Image: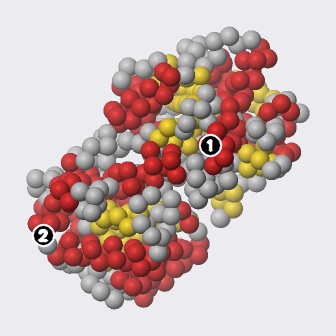
Amino acid sequence: MRILLASSEVHPYSKTGGLADMIGALGKAFARAGHHVGVVTPLYRGVAARFPEIRRVDWRMDLPLATWHARAELWALEPLKGLTVYFIHKPKFFDRGSLYHEHGKDYHDNGERFIFFSKCVAHLARYLPWQPEVVHLNDWQTALVPALILHQARREGWGNRPRTCLTIHNLAYQGVFPRSAYAMTNLPGDYFHPEGAEYFGKLNCLKAGIVYADRVTTVSPRYAREITTEEFGCGLDGVLRKRKPPVQGILNGVDYEEWKTIGNPHLSYPFSAEDLSGKAASKAALQQELGLPVEPKIPLFGAITRLTEQKGIDIELAALEQMLPGNLQFVLLGSGDHGYERAFQKLAHRFPNKVAVRLGYDQGLSHRIEAGCDFYLMPSKFEPCGLNQMYSLRYGTVPIVRAVGGLDDTVVDAAEDPAAASGIKFVEYSANALAKAMHKAVVIYADAELLRHYQRNGMAADYSWDRTVGGYLEAFQSV
Ligand code: ADP
Ligand code: GLC
């Protein structure tokens, strides 16, 4: 199949979260399975310097944006046979300190930036010589593309237009802009109404994708069900319920070429399910690196996360308050909300021998935390899929998760199946429920054989990409 993937972030070029990991891995997996794949993404600051093989393509885009025209260059790279990554080079929009926001504030022109990006995607879908058959859009930043393609097909008689598939990675971000932003789409009014791109008088990019894409998917089966309810629907549950065929949940995969415990450049001590001595050495090294007492017998809990409401940070802080007088250590790597950042710093200050906090973004440290911890905390309020719990399983780090979205789909609790138990789940969104789950962890930790049982199950779980690729190909075939 000829597939064009579009995403505002792609690992290893740019990343703020799991979307980047997912698209980076999916592109490679499609190409390995023999498909013709293009991935299109913005050329952000520093990418060309980090990847000097990126070359300018002799192709200029000059696209209408409301009443003016905006130009961009196309750059490209072929990291793998069958896979080309296209970069949209438009310094005015993408040569910035960050992807979406700085100093806690969204860039004021995010609407313009990603409407323009979406137009570039639609342009490539139309004019790439290899003629993509499917255009796969991801999240609000590219969700206007289906409407742009539909309109172009209607207007120009683009007979065999590519089919479009939108994947929702997070319904909480919809790309909502004032009505005036709609002019930048250069679409006629026909698409701006309550059954289309309009949401209470505003432009809602994600809603436009949900309405106009040929197919809509999301990143876990449970989240696919959840988002059709008022509780998780973020105001779009009604629109999602109307989708035919219904929104399909396809569980994300893990790139085990990167997330591995043997031959991983970020890890000094390799280990496996059969021989966990390297994991013990990784724990000692991590404790030392973070300035915590090197204590092999104290359970070490970890978290690597965007510090946002979604991730259950408020109950995590409160549960730690309850648990920290006991015998445990905790490490956090994260960044985001300044209030949460300060709260964790205060905690580290009050419990210097028990809590280590690193604010910022650090890929290498994220691997070392996954490898060195005994337990991983993911008490999310909602979680479309979640990747860190799957990385934890592979690294023999027992995940403690709230039973929502992809967390529920990927972790097995002893109450569900004692023989297959790989982690600890709790249901109620409260600090008490999380603290109770952490208590269970401490009990498991005290029983070496039981801990090994959880680790063995987790490390054997296979969330590789082959299954995920099959799910997407089926969805693409169906349109
Ligand atoms: P989300 O996409 O909602 O943030 P996921 O669990 O799907 O959640 O993916 C998060 C990804 O971002 C993981 O690869 C995780 O390791 C990474 N990540 C999050 N915060 C940091 C950080 N501060 N430093 C390094 N990696 C991080
Ligand atoms: C979003 C979700 C996360 C998911 C990721 C990749 O960022 O919050 O749960 O794993 O996208 O699909």
Q: How is the image coloured?
A: secondary structure
Q: Which mark is residue 436?
A: none
Name the amino acid, label 2.
Ala
Left/right placement of residue 313 relative to residue 400 reads right
Which class describes the residues within 10 Å of circle 2: few (<14), some (14-19), or many (20+)?
A: few
Q: Is residue 174 above or below residue 195?
A: below
Relative image position of residue 75 (x, y in whole percent): 58, 29
Name the amino acid, label 1.
Leu
Relative image position of residue 238 (x, y in whole percent): 66, 47
Q: Along the polypeptide, which appears first: circle 2 or circle 1?
A: 1
Q: In the rendered structure, are the residues bearing label 2 and label 1 in contact, judged by CB atoms less than 8 Å apart?
A: no
Quadrant (top left, top right, bottom left, bottom right) of the C terminus: top right
Q: Which residue is mark 1?
A: 240
Q: Find the residue positioned furthest to the right.
A: 67
Relative image position of residue 342 (x, y in whole percent): 54, 78
Can residue 369 be seen here? The reply is no
Q: Secondary structure at mark 2?
A: helix
Can residue 466 be seen here? The reply is yes
The answer to which of 224 and 15 lies nearer the viewer is 224
Left/right placement of residue 30 relative to residue 382 reads left
Q: Is residue 40 above or below residue 18?
A: above
The answer to which of 130 and 143 lies nearer the viewer is 143
Q: Which mark is residue 448?
A: 2
Left/right placement of residue 167 relative to residue 258 reads right
Left/right placement of residue 152 relative to residue 358 reads right
